Image (cartoon, grey):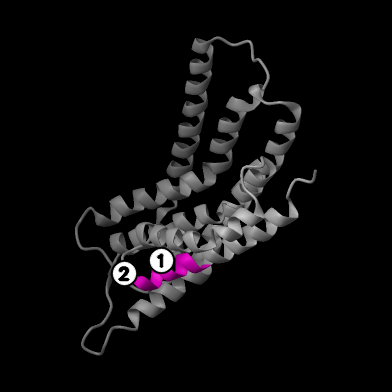
């Protein structure tokens, strides 16, 4: 770690400024998204078919929620860069070089999880769950409930795609190893299904759709841990 030459008060001022920049970026992204909220709703609800809203403010409030989500996604590189810029002066040269790899990788993996879920998992989940209807029981989704269901899937998938990257960092720091991951596999499986039950809507299908990719990513993490294991 390096000395930054800043007082505690100056650190708090810089932290405040970084937070303000991040919030402004999210707000700007949400504002621009809200301008195009009609197009966003059409795009993000393409797997749902025809939707309805059940109260006068529902469409408006849901548009705001979706705009904030899209604004956050758009501002994510800025938010993460502000966080890393805050801690950057305290890092060594080698740690800074590592960050230049970690930051874009973490952003790309988060986006990859979102895209994977939206184009593969979400339509499968909707199709599977609506098959439980009947001629006398036709599916009718409200806009608010569908968007909430979608976000409950998208955000966890974005996070779990970070697992291989986090594993790689911990391996390089000698905090975990491939052997430890293999020995902990059965405990990890239990934790995976508990986490999937907490993060997803309360039905076994969506829980499995989150749990199975996590298990696959865990196995990938074991392979990465073996490849990246410190020598000597």
Q: Residue placed at 75% from the left, 28% from the top?
A: 93
| Picture residue at 34% right of the left edge, 73% below the top | 50
The segment highlighted magenta reads 204-212
Would you say residue 78 is visible in this rendering? Answer: yes
Look at the picture and state if 44 lies above or below 85: below
* On screen, residue 226 above or below 207: above
**Does the magenta segment cover residue 154?**
no
Q: Is residue 34 visible?
A: no
Name the residue carrying label 2. 51
Quarter occupied by residue 59:
bottom left
Q: Left or right? Give the position of 152 relative to 179.
A: left
Residue 146 percent coordinates (x, y): 33, 64
Q: Residues within 10 Å of mark 1 (few under 14, many from 20)?
A: some
Q: Quadrant of residue 174?
A: top right
State the separation of the CA atoms marked 1 and 2: 8 Å
Relative to residue 123, is residue 136 depicted above or below?
Answer: below
The reply to whether discs 1 and 2 touch (Cβ–Cβ < 8 Å) is yes
Q: Is residue 170 left or right of residue 61?
A: right
Report the residue that reaches farthest toward the right.
232
Front-most of residues 53 and 92: 92
Residue 119 position in % (x across, y down) = 52, 68
Residue at position x 41%, y 61% in the image: 196
Toward which corner of the image does residue 151 lie, by quadrant? bottom left
| Residue plotted at (80% across, 43% down) | 232
Q: Which residue is mark 1?
A: 45
10 Å crowding of disc 2: few (<14), some (14-19), many (20+): some
Dominant SS type (magenta): helix
Q: Is residue 94 left or right of residue 140?
A: right
Tag 2, which secondary structure?
Answer: strand
Residue in front for this viewpoint, 49 or 132: 132
Q: Is residue 208 one of those drawn in magenta?
A: yes
């Amino acid at each position: 770690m390096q000395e930054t030459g800043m007082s505690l008060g100056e650190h708090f001022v810089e932290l405040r400024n970084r937070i303000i920049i991040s919030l402004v970026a999210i707000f700007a992204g949400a504002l621009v998204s809200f301008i195009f909220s009609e197009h966003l709703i059409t795009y993000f609800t393409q797997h749902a078919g025809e939707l309805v809203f059940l109260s006068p403010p529902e469409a408006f409030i849901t548009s705001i929620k979706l705009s904030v989500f899209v604004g956050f996604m758009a501002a994510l590189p800025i938010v993460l860069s502000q966080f890393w810029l805050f801690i950057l002066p305290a890092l060594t040269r080698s740690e800074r070089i590592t960050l230049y790899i970690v930051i874009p990788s973490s952003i790309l993996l988060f986006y990859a999880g979102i895209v994977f879920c939206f184009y593969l998992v979400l339509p499968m989940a909707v199709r599977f769950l609506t098959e439980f209807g009947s001629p006398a029981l036709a599916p009718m989704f409200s806009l608010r409930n569908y968007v909430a269901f979608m976000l409950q899937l998208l955000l966890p998938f974005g996070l779990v795609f970070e697992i291989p990257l986090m594993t790689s960092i911990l391996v390089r720091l000698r905090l975990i190893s491939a052997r430890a991951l293999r020995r902990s596999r059965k405990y990890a499986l239990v934790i995976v299904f508990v986490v999937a039950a907490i993060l997803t809507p309360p039905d076994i299908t969506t829980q499995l759709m989150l749990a199975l990719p996590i298990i696959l990513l865990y196995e990938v993490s074991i392979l990465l841990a073996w490849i990246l294991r410190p020598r000597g």
